[in-house]
Each structure stands twice: as C-alpha cells, then as structure tokens.
C-alpha cells in the first residue's frame, strides 16, 4: 500500500504544482461571487439562482479537472518514458495503475472540498441557508469523482488522449439529460433499437444519480442513508469493473 | 552456487517483432542467444536500430517477445523477484520535472522497498556518489541532460542491486561526469556485481568491459572477451566496430 500511496502522492503533487486546480478554483470563485452579488441587490427569490449557478459551475469545473487529470496520467507516463524507472523497481503494473487512480481520486476530492468550502463561505456571507442535504450532495459529488476517475484512467489505455477527454466529458456532462431521454424514448422503440437503448442505459455510468444540486437548491430534506449506501455500492461496483479492465489492459501494454 | 545463480542473464532464441503503422512486420531481434555470468561487465554494442534497446526492454519485462525465453537470476524477465535485484537506467533519462531530485529519489526508494528509517541516508549517499550534493533541492525541470543522467544513475544504483542494466550510460555526460560514472562502475565491478550496458561510446566499452556483444539487425555478429578480441584484431575498438559492420576503416 505504501508504494500505491507513494505514486498517488506524486500524482497529486504534479497537479498542484502545475497549478491547474488553482486556476479553476479562482475562476469558479469569480463566477460564484458574481452570482452572489445579485443577491445583494435586494432582488427577491435570487437565492435559488445563486445556489444553482454556484453548484453548476463548481460541479462542472470539478468534472473537467478530474477528467483532464485522469486522461493524462498513464499516456503521459508512457510518452515521457517516466514509467520506465518506476516499473524497473519491484512494483507491479497493477500497483502503478492503482497509484495513478488514487492520485487522481485524492486530487479531485481535494478540489471538490475546496470548491464546497468556497461555496459554504459565500453562502454564509450572502446569508443563504444550506443544510444537511448540502453535506450529502458533497459526499455524492466526491463519490462521483472516484467513479469518473476509474473510467477515464481505464479509457486512457484504449483511446487517444483527445478522444478520451472528449468522450469522457460528453458522458459526464450529458448523463443528466441523456439517461432520462433513454427512459423516455424506451417505450417508443422496438426490437434492436430497444435492446440497444437498454444496453446503453446499463453500460453508461449513471452520474445523474450522484447529483443532488436541485435538492440543495430547493432545500429538500436529507435523503435516506439507505439511498446513500446503495449509491456507494453502485459506485464501488462500477469503478471496480473499470479498474479491473484497466489493470488487465495495462498489464498487456508494450512499452 | 547453482547454475541459475552463475548465469545472471539467460536469453534463449529471442525474437521480437513490431508492426509498423502500415501493418508491415519488422523483426527487431532475431533468434538472440546470450548469457551473462555473475560478476561480468558486458558491453552491448551495435549501430542505431540494431535491437539493443529492444533487447533491454525485454530483459526488463517492458515488452513481450514473440518467441524465446528470457530469465534473470533464474526468474522470468519482468518478474518482481527478478526486478528486486536489478538497477536500470533507461536510454533517455526522463524524470518528473516537477519533483526535486531528493523527492524523486525518495519515490524510487519507496518503490525499491528501502525501509523508511534508512531512506534519507541512502539518498544522501547516492547524491554524494553522483556528485549532486547541494543541487538536490532543485526541481528536475531545471536540470541539464547530464544532471538528469546522474539522477538516473542514482536511482539505478539504489539498494546496491546485483545487476545493473544501463542503456546508453554516458549519454549526455561531460568528460568529468563520464570519468565519475566510470569510477562508479569500476567500484561496482570490484564488488563482484554484474553490469550489462549498451553504449555508443566505444572508449567507455574498452575501458570497462570484460566482454562485448556486437549486435546488428537484431543478430549477434560478434561475442568475445575484450582482451582476446584485441589480440585477434589489433585495431582500435572503433575501427573494429566499423569493419565488422561492413564499412572501410580509415
């Protein structure tokens, strides 16, 4: 485990020393602050608008950071040949894969926590209430980052860097409408098209389930712990399948 | 001592093929047989594209051969138990530019399995050995090619491996650094360790090696003890190299 964490530490250090998260954090802060100022102009009902903008922007930017970092890890190690001295040591390729995955997961978690700390500060400053659902949304957002990291790191071994970033961002950003669209059109389809829609529905990661933004905006009560546990299980199984596939592929890559 | 322990590297009938982007098959290594005994310093020489780096990559387990068996210390190439006893320097030394030299060596020490309590003293010793004292807190992104090569040598020598596999060891080094590296390798040789290295620098090869293996088009075209070779062929190693590869000597 120490070897996995050693590689993960270097991955986190790289992201922060490249300053990618800071740029996005500052950008996110500026947008959220801009939205928050509306609330100060005394316009009634803008509290929900501020929350909506703040959550959408931070979620979007966190996903972008996670996808870009995850897509870069293994291809960059192979292209820059930094992988050779690592794999010359008594470590398995699975260890390296897990090190990279953990690194992206930890870095994305740190970014989400920083974003949400920013949000909490802004909510307090502008007198906007959050509540328990806010913390549940935070937990699920972090969970979704680990899920995204698993499939993006794995896809990086099958697709080119550009294709991986594009496909992954499309999956992440379109799922909230895409999943519902499949459900809506399913009954209208027949035969092969229906089977295809079902296959797509079961294969794609249901990231929309991890998004509690609307519930936070409309101040819903907290969701049952059973639902959180089920989503945790879903994320673990889904990420596990992708990690297994990624490790299998990485062990066979000729360097 | 078992025969496996006597033979540190055993390569038998190694074939490595590539496919080009156009789908054409290229034979990089063709039926290679070689053996390196414990305590030997072997120079693996040949022109560009001869198959030296490919062979070394197979020894390290980075590539799978099409045919043949490769064993190091009696274990399959690339196995963790074999890699525990190997130090490796890649052909082009690239290391994380965002890390300082000490941070990078700390990572390699961790991966090598050096106990936490010993790590800093091992790193101090290596930094001293490769002549980077006082520069170890600088990021590798600001290092020259020669300094990076020194870091590469330091990480390869970590935990005093029984076998050093070095791909283009003196690449990018200035004369002083070459002298230092030669001294390091000589001390390794005196300790009875095994060194297998590829180089274009024939002076280096002549000064360090017990034996040379000359490779061309993926095949061994000469394998001999250096002393015997120089008696048999009273030429400089460079002239001999050129002649063997089918060019006229000057």
Image (spheres, rainbow, N blue to C red):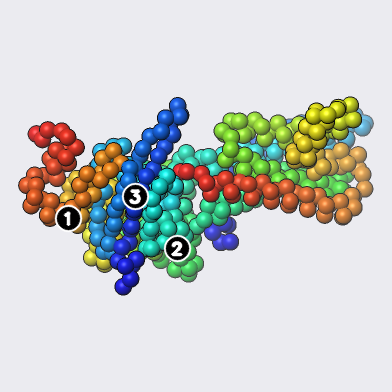
Most foreground residue, B249 or A221: B249
Using the rendered image, report if marks 1 and 2 lie on a common chain.
yes
Reading the image, the residue beneath label 2 is B81
Most foreground residue, A80 or A19: A80
Q: Chain of mark 2?
A: B
Which residue: 58% across, 30% down?
A162
Between marks 1 and 3, how big is the CA–CA gap? Answer: 22 Å
Reading the image, the residue beneath label 3 is B13
Instruction: Residue B126: give x, y in percent of width and height.
Output: 36, 60
- Label 2 secondary element: helix
Which residue: 44% across, 47% down?
B64
**Mark sitting earlier along the chain (1/2):** 2
Reading the image, the residue beneath label 1 is B225
Discs 2/3, front: 3
Using the rendered image, report if marks 2 and 3 lie on a common chain.
yes
- Label 3 secondary element: strand
Instruction: Residue B151: give x, y in percent of width and height.
Output: 37, 51
Between marks 2 and 3, how big is the CA–CA gap? Answer: 23 Å
Q: Please tell me the numbered disc located at residue B241.
A: none
Between marks 1 and 2, how big is the CA–CA gap? Answer: 30 Å
């Amino acid at each position: 485990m120490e070897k996995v964490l050693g590689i993960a530490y270097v991955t986190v250090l790289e992201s922060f020393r490249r300053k990618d998260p800071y740029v996005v954090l500052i950008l996110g802060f500026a947008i959220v602050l801009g939205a928050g100022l509306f609330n100060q102009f005394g316009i009634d009902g803008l509290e929900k608008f501020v929350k909506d903008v703040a959550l959408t922007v931070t979620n979007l930017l966190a996903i972008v950071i996670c996808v870009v970092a995850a897509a870069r890890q293994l291809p960059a190690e192979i292209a820059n040949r930094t992988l050779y001295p690592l794999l010359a040591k008594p470590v398995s390729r699975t260890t390296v894969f897990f090190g990279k995955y953990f690194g992206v997961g930890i870095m994305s978690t740190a970014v989400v926590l920083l974003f949400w700390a920013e949000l909490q500060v802004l909510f307090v400053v502008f007198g906007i209430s959050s509540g328990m659902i806010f913390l549940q949304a935070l937990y699920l957002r972090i969970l979704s980052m680990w899920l995204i990291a698993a499939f993006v790191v794995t896809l990086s071994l099958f697709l080119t860097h550009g294709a991986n970033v594009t496909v992954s961002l499309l999956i992440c950003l379109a799922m909230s409408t895409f999943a519902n669209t499949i459900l809506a059109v399913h009954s209208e389809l027949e035969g092969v098209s229906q089977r295809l829609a079902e296959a797509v529905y079961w294969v794609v990661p249901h990231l929309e389930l991890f998004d509690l933004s609307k519930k936070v905006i409309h101040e819903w009560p907290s969701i049952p712990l059973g639902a959180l546990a089920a989503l945790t299980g879903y994320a673990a199984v889904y990420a596990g399948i992708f990690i297994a596939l990624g490790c299998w592929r990485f062990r066979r890559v000729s360097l | 001592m078992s025969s496996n322990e006597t033979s540190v590297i055993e390569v038998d009938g190694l074939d490595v093929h590539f496919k080009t982007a156009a789908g054409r098959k290229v034979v990089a290594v063709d039926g290679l047989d070689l053996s390196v005994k414990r305590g030997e310093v072997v120079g693996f020489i040949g022109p560009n594209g001869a198959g030296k780096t490919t062979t070394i990559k197979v020894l390290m387990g980075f590539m799978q051969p099409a045919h043949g068996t490769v064993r190091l210390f009696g274990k399959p190439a690339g196995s963790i138990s074999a890699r525990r006893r190997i130090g490796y320097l890649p052909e082009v030394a690239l290391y994380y530019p965002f890390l300082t030299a000490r941070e990078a060596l700390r990572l390699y020490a961790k991966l090598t399995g050096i106990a936490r309590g010993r790590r800093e003293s091992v790193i101090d010793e290596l930094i001293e050995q490769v002549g980077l004292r006082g520069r170890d807190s600088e990021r590798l992104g600001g290092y020259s090619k020669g300094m990076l090569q020194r870091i590469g040598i330091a990480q390869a020598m970590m935990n005093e491996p029984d076998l050093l596999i070095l791909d283009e060891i003196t690449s990018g080094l200035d004369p002083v650094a070459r002298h230092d590296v030669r001294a390091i390798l000589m001390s390794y040789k005196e300790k009875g360790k095994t060194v297998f290295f590829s180089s274009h620098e024939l002076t280096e090869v002549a000064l360090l090696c017990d034996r040379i293996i000359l490779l061309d088009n993926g095949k061994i075209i000469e394998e001999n003890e250096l002393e015997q070779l120089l008696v048999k062929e009273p030429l400089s190693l460079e002239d001999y190299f050129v002649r063997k590869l089918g060019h006229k000597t000057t």
